[in-house]
Image: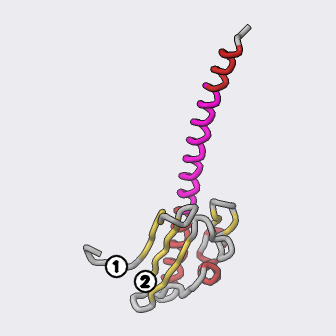
């Protein structure tokens, strides 16, 4: 048999290994969700560009994701808006708390900016734009 101290040492070692594994798993899960959010943003950008091609170079004028969705739905793959990786539901104004996507349109320059934020809406993960900026901006 084993003594009580030997069993406790084995349990502590297994607990430490499990803790390392769980923290590593959660980090990779977060990276996968961020990658999914970037992919959703790229799909929306492609749909916005296709919309522009069909509308003489004009981009959608939208103040919310639901307005944008209504205008570009025909240009999205399978006519489905991308899913939010947090809860696997399609992005919408109601479902935009985590991995938040924003779309802003500048009518003067006929340009747009699409951004996606991290899970807590603190850090910008990705930004896509057709806006031309000069060096140094």
x and y percent of residue 18 in the render?
63, 33
Res 106 quadrant in image: bottom left
SS state under label 2? strand
Q: Residues within 10 Å of mark 1 (few under 14, many from 20)?
A: few
- Which residue in the protein does label 2 denote? 111
Label 2 close to label 1 by CB (< 8 Å)? yes
Residue at image position (53%, 68%) is 41
Residue at image position (66%, 74%) is 92
- Along the viewing direction, whichever of 122 and 9 lies nearer the viewer: 9
Q: Is residue 30 magenta?
A: yes
Residue at image position (60%, 31%) is 16
x and y percent of residue 20 in the render?
57, 36
Q: Relative to 66, does residue 101 appear above or below in the rendering?
A: above
Colour mode of the rendering? secondary structure
Res 7 quadrant in image: top right
Query: Considering only order in the chain, which callout, 1 or 2, is on the residue closer to the N terminus?
Result: 2
- Magenta residues: mostly which secondary structure? helix
Q: Is residue 20 magenta?
A: yes
Q: Quadrant of the C terminus?
A: bottom left
Q: Relative to 103, does residue 27 appear above or below in the rendering?
A: above
On screen, residue 105 versus residue 30, left or right, reads: left
View extreme (bottom): residue: 108
Q: Relative to 35, does residue 105 appear above or below in the rendering?
A: below
- Which residue in the protein does label 1 denote? 132
- Along the viewing direction, whichever of 118 and 71 lies nearer the viewer: 118
SS state under label 1? loop
Res 25 quadrant in image: top right
Q: Which residues are magenta?
A: 13-37
- Along the viewing direction, whichever of 7 and 62 lies nearer the viewer: 7
């Amino acid at each position: 048999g084993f003594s009580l101290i030997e069993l406790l040492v084995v349990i502590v070692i297994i607990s430490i290994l499990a803790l390392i594994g769980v923290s590593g798993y959660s980090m990779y899960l977060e990276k996968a969700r961020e990658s999914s959010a970037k992919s959703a943003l790229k799909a929306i950008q492609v749909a916005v560009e296709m919309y522009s091609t069909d509308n003489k170079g004009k981009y959608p004028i939208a103040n919310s994701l639901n307005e944008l969705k209504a205008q570009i739905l025909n240009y999205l793959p399978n006519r489905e808006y991308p899913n939010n990786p947090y809860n696997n539901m399609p992005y919408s104004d109601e479902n935009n708390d985590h991995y938040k996507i924003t779309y802003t349109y500048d009518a003067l320059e006929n340009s747009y900016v699409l951004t996606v934020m991290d899970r807590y809406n603190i850090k910008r993960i990705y930004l896509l734009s057709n806006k031309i900026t000069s060096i140094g901006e």
